[in-house]
Amino acid sequence: MQFNNNSHYKSRSAGETTAAAATTGNTGSGTGTEYGPKDAKYKVGVIPKFVAEDYFIACERGFATAADELGIRVTWVGDTMAQCSAQNQKNYIQSFIDQEYDAILVSALDPSSYADTLQEARDAGIKVITWDADVEVDARDFFVNQAEGDMIAIKLLQGLAGDLSSYTKDKPATVALVSTTTDSPNQNAWLAAIQKEYESKKDTEYAHIKLLTDVTYAGNDQGQADTAIKALLSKDKEIVGIIALSSNTVPAVASSREQLNLGEIKIVGVSVPESSRKDMDAGKMSAVVLWQPFDLGYLTLYVASAVLEGKDPSGAAFVSPLSGTNMTASFMDGTTPVLYPAEGHKIMENNVVILGEPIVWNLKNIDRFRGYPNADSGMSEFLK
């Protein structure tokens, strides 16, 4: 594989971080980018779902910052949205095994297709940590999750229900769910939690909402998402609200709404705030729900470092440099600090470490989003 050729690696400092460019399609030959000292004690391979996309650019910058602080050599490698596949990720994992890396950190495109390869890595003494999206529990050592899935789902549904509060039980608002693919572990967990929350309160808190049972799967490619959403809104003219479960579905909904002149459709979604700034400015969207992807990358490398040093996270919480520091500002006033718990990041069963609570982003706190669009975006309050 091309990936085995170290001439493909470009070494950058945290301040110079840009997303690694990908090359060919399904061979798993994306260009790698390296961070941290060349003579580091540990080599860590990091595989995102895809590269050159707003969310993962912010994650990459978090990894780069932590690599410099910890003195760990990090190789970041992946493919673009259009070229990504589980097979490519498997190829990258195998290459890290062959090169005897100390740890492999992966954001999984699906939970099971390369579990055997991850187990091979563990059998070889390589630490396996998932982040952002998990694999089967017995195929990894730890999972660093951005937030508890139920909390994300409830915030999304409550947010849209609030935006549609003018509707009634007799004349309810029709709401659609839009996800990426049928095998995406994050989105599937959120879908299940949204549907559970809705069913439990559909006669009370959500009586003015009619949640469609069919989910629209818009894929990971922006062009594919645009097409799928336009088809959905063209087919069902009664839709007045959409919950979008990934960063590429929110702009797809927004652009399709404009093309079809459907200005009354409300959108709440999981999205990088900057991607929705235009719609917020125009009053078409009130807020999005996310976390700090920069911090997710940063925390994941700190967890990996602890595991490599034989200090596995245990007990009720894992303390990192983020603990007790500024997560963002409140969406209510844009100034009140929202902090990570000083006692540390919650540790759940099956070795899951939680970054923090999901964040509601709007125009009052959007400029506190870290690591995107620029490397210094939102960094003024980092670790403060």
Image (tube, rainbow, N blue to C red):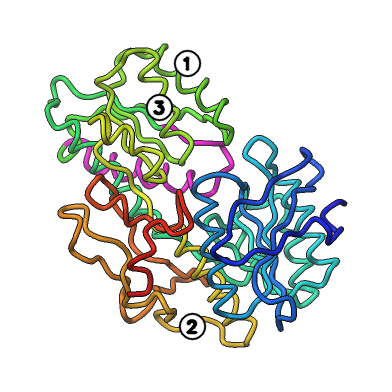
Relative horizontal placement of residue 192, taking residue 164 as reference (left or right): right
Structural crowding at the residue carrying mark 1, measured as other residues with C-alpha within 10 Å and reported as few (<14), some (14–19) or many (≥20): few
- Name which residue lies at 25% across and 65% down: 338
Cβ atoms at labels 1 and 3 below 8 Å apart: no
Q: Is 191 included in the stretch rendered in magenta?
A: yes
Relative horizontal placement of residue 88, taking residue 2 as reference (left or right): left
**Secondary structure under badge 1?**
helix
What mark, if any, has residue 314 been given in the picture?
Answer: 2
Label 1 sits on what residue type? Ala
Label 2 sits on what residue type? Ser
Could you say which quadrant of the image residue 149 lies in? bottom left
Which residue was labeled with disc 1? Answer: 231
**Secondary structure under badge 2?**
loop
Relative horizontal placement of residue 378, taking residue 362 as reference (left or right): right
**Secondary structure under badge 3?**
helix
Q: Comparing marks 3 and 2, which lies closer to the viewer?
A: 3
Q: In this view, does 323 lie above or below 289?
A: below
